[in-house]
Structures are given as structure tokens and as C-alpha cells.
Amino acid sequence: MQDKYENMTVLPKANIYFEGRVVSHTAYDPSGNKFTFGVIMPGSYEFDVESKEVIDYTAGSAKLLIPGNCEWIFVKAGDRVTIPENCKFKIISEDITEYVCAYVTE
């Protein structure tokens, strides 16, 4: 996990989900790779994913239910999770959780 992201192009419009309980901003690195930097407020959410995502958790903790796993996975700051493309996953956050998501296009 990176401590700092330099030379990024950040889009000023926020991505707002679940009535403002999940908010992220989109950024692109110099190679055109897409990232989102976000905050998840306490609650339970389901996300519909199109492309493969690699998520680094930078603060807080949560439980994830990812397709292919039978049990919930506990994640905390410093953890990395890969979400497969074209799926839905669930997340339960009991505190404020922050993340960086890299979108993988292969």
C-alpha cells in the first residue's frame, strides 16, 4: 500500500452513494490507471462491480462478503482485498472506514 500518490489527476465531482453514507473521488495516474479514494460511514452496503478492483483499506475496519467466499472476511487498515469483475459484494462497516481502490483492466 502506498503512503502517498503523486502526479494524479483528480476529478472534482464526488461519487456519492447510499444517501451520502459512502463518498469517493476518482483520480487517474499518469498512465491513465483509475483509482478512487473514499470514505464509508457505518452501515451495511452492497456494491455492483464491473471491473476487477484491488482495495487497500487505510483506516477503520469492515466485514466483506465476496462472491466465492462462504464466510465474511474481516478487513482493517493495512489490508488489501481483490474483488473479481462483474459481481456484487457486501460490506458492513461498524466505524468510519477509508480506502483506496485501484481498477484493474486486463
Image (spheres, rainbow, N blue to C red):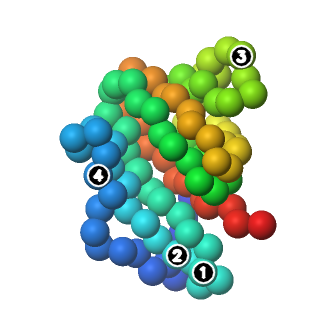
Residue 21 lies in quadrant:
top left
Q: CA distance from mark 2 to mark 1?
A: 5 Å
How packed is label 4: few (under 14 Cα within 10 Å), some, or many (20 or more)?
few
Q: CA distance from mark 1 to mark 4?
A: 22 Å
Q: Is residue 37 above or below residue 6?
A: above
Q: Nearer the viewer, mark 4 or mark 2?
A: 4
Asked if the residues shown at circle 1 and circle 3 are in contact, with their CB atoms under 8 angstroms apart, the answer is no
N-term mark: 1 or 4: 4
Q: Which element carries disc 2, helix, strand or loop?
A: strand
Residue 72 lies in quadrant:
top right
Q: Which element carries disc 3, helix, strand or loop?
A: loop
Residue 19 vs residue 42, the one in the foreground: 19
Q: Is residue 40 visible?
A: yes
Q: Please, which residue is most extreme toward the top here?
A: 71
Q: Nearer the viewer, mark 3 or mark 2?
A: 3
Q: Identify the amino acid type marked 1.
A: Gly
How packed is label 3: few (under 14 Cα within 10 Å), some, or many (20 or more)?
few
Q: Identify the amino acid type marked 3.
A: Cys
Q: Please, which residue is most extreme toward the front here?
A: 86
Q: Mark 1 highlights which residue? A: 32
Q: Quadrant of the C terminus?
A: bottom right
Q: Mark 2 highlights which residue? A: 28
